[in-house]
Each structure stands twice: as C-alpha cells, then as structure tokens.
Image (cartoon, helix red, strand yellow):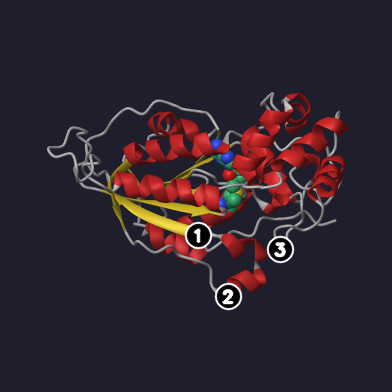
Amino acid sequence: MAPVVHNPVMVREVVEALGIRPGGSYIDCTVGEGGHAEAILAAAEQAPRLLGLDLDEDSLATARRRLEKHLDKVTLVRGSYAGLERFAVDNGFMGADGILFDLGFSSAQLDRPARGFSFAGEGPLDMRFDTRQKLTAERLVNTMSERELADLIYKLGEEHRSRRIARAIVAARPLTTTTQLADVVARAAGGHGHGRIHPATRTFQAIRIAVNAELGNIEAGLAQAVQVLAGGGRLVVLSYHSLEDRLVKEFMRRESTGCLCGPSAPPCTCGHTATLRLVSRKVVKPTEEEVRTNPRSRSAKIRVAERTLGATRKKVTERITW
Ligand SMILES: C[S@@+](CC[C@H](N)C(=O)[O-])C[C@H]1O[C@@H](n2cnc3c(N)ncnc32)[C@H](O)[C@@H]1O
C-alpha cells in the first residue's frame, strides 16, 4: 500500500497570511511532513530561514526528505511548541518574522493504524504524538475513574452522552485496541447522535487531546509565540475544531486588547497592554474546491494577528496541563 502523505490545508492562504519576506525567518511549530514549510521556503526568491518543530519522529523524517534542497536554510527539531521560546533562543530564531501553528494531527498519523489515532483500522490504543511519552490512550482509558473519564469525554469531546460512555468503558475494561474502544462507545452511545459522524469520533478526540495535553500546550505555545515574534511579525493559526478555535480566538482577543479591567473599574489596575493587532476579525476558511479535493480541510479556520511594534517582552514559563 502506498504510504499516506499529509495534504497540507490552505497552503496559499497560510503563505499569504505569513507575508513571507525574502531572507526572513519563520517558525513552523507543527512542521509535520513539511507541506506548509515547503511552500514557505518557496514563497520568496531569496529563501527564508525556517525552524520546524514537531513531536513526531516519523513526520520529521518525511519533512527532512521533502525539504532536502533547502536544508542549509532549515533547522528541524523534535520537540513541543510548549517549549517554543527555548527552541527559538537555542537556534537563533528570536525576533522571527512569522510563526505558524497547524494544530491537531496529520492524515499520515491518522491513517497509520499502529499509531492508534483512528477507529477505522485496528491498532493499539496509543494516540501519542511523541512516542517517548509514558502516557498512552490505553493507560488513560484503563486507569481513570468513571467520573474522571466522563468529565474528560464531556469537556474535551463536547460529547453529551459522556456518562453512559464512561460507564460502558469501565465495565468493558481492560481495553487494548482502537476497535474495541470504538465498539464499546458505539454501543453505549446508541447510534449517530451528532449527525453523520461516527459515534466514537468525539470520545476519540477527547482521549487524544488528553493524552497529548493539547490545550495546555496550545496556550503555552501561543503565549511564547508573542514573545518570540519581531514587531510586525505574523502569528498564523490553523485550527480544526471548536475547542481549538475558541482558545485561539480568546487568546488573540485578549492579547489585542489594552486594559482588561472593564468599563466599571476605571482607573486601570491590571496594567495589561496589547501585544497583538488582529489582521482581520474574520476567520479564513477553505474554498469549496479545496473542501472537495481535501475533505480534511472542511472544518479548518485560519486566524491571523501581528505583533505590535514596541510591545515589551516578558519571560513566559512553560505550562503543560489539559
Ligand atoms: C496538522 S499536522 C501538521 C501538518 C504540516 N503542516 C504539514 O504541512 O505537513 C499537525 C502536527 O503537529 C504535531 N504536533 C502536535 N502537537 C505538537 C506539539 N505540542 N509540539 C509540536 N508538534 C506537535 C503533530 O505531530 C503533527 O505532525
């Protein structure tokens, strides 16, 4: 079977939003298989420098092959964007002209049953982006209390049948494969309650987010991106579901606002100043043509902001929670 290659989403729109400058410096926080990175490097006659981060060793190997002809301009690092500031300092990328986050997982990860992200094929309950990490989906599913599981599935999967599902999971333990988990969830959920999606979709999303501490990592990464960008540098974020998008939207709204005290509390006591300017209040969505040819782009949204000139830099500490 031919290996699945990730088809990058809204490449033209991402490159446009980053506003690539010849010889500039860019950080792709989720370089994956290098699709967006390749387009960034090709966007200016004098190729920019690029730092690419990813937790997934296999994806980085593919990116390295794909970006071969630009390797003098490219630094690829296996690490989390939750440590963005440190990677930028260590590799000479402080004051970057643009930073990209393409959130979530890639098609290559989803379509490889051995990675355990999908219920479509049988695989181990794994779901780790970083295979060095101890916590797997199997450990999480088999050790959490029913109450904890129900809360997790409700909050991170936005699944209203979470209590029933958690009860069924606990009764069926131990669970070791993706298809076992999907069957238990489908039986407990009792059919397609949320339209046309598979009944296990939301539970799988919740478990994946928890295993990889995704929401805490996004918060940490975004906060550090503001500190790493040059004045006028662009922050471009591609998200794929409402939890991610809400987080990005709230972050950009807060960081583009001056005083946060509210109208009832003058004079200002918070001392907050805007570090970002929203490039547009509207999100960018894929064209109908792209959705037709790349169904994964269906739910994608791009938000873009620019670091304000003269905003003071703060040291951001790493926060990893979900
Ligand atoms: C949607 S894919 C990116 C695809 C990429 N833009 C391309 O064109 O090939 C998201 C990637 O983010 C990576 N990832 C997830 N969480 C991460 C984190 N905290 N730090 C770094 N990479 C992460 C995943 O391993 C995955 O490769």
Query: Which label sits in the foreground, 3 or 1?
Result: 3
Horizontal and vertical percent position of residue 298: 60, 64
In percent of the image, x 61 and y 70: which residue is there?
A: 291
**Left or right of residue 108: residue 17:** left
* SS at badge 2: helix
Compared to 80, does 229 lie above or below?
below
In front of the other: 233 or 264: 264
Q: Mark 2 near mark 3, Cβ–Cβ under 8 Å?
A: no
In front of the other: 144 or 177: 144
Q: Amino acid at mark 1?
A: Lys
In front of the other: 145 or 231: 145
**Left or right of residue 227: residue 322:** right
Ranked by sequence position, the earlier of labels 3 and 1 is 3
Which label was assigned to residue 195?
3
Residue 55 visible at all = yes
Quadrant hosting ligand 1: top right
Q: Label 2 belongs to which residue? A: 288
Q: Label 1 belongs to which residue? A: 301
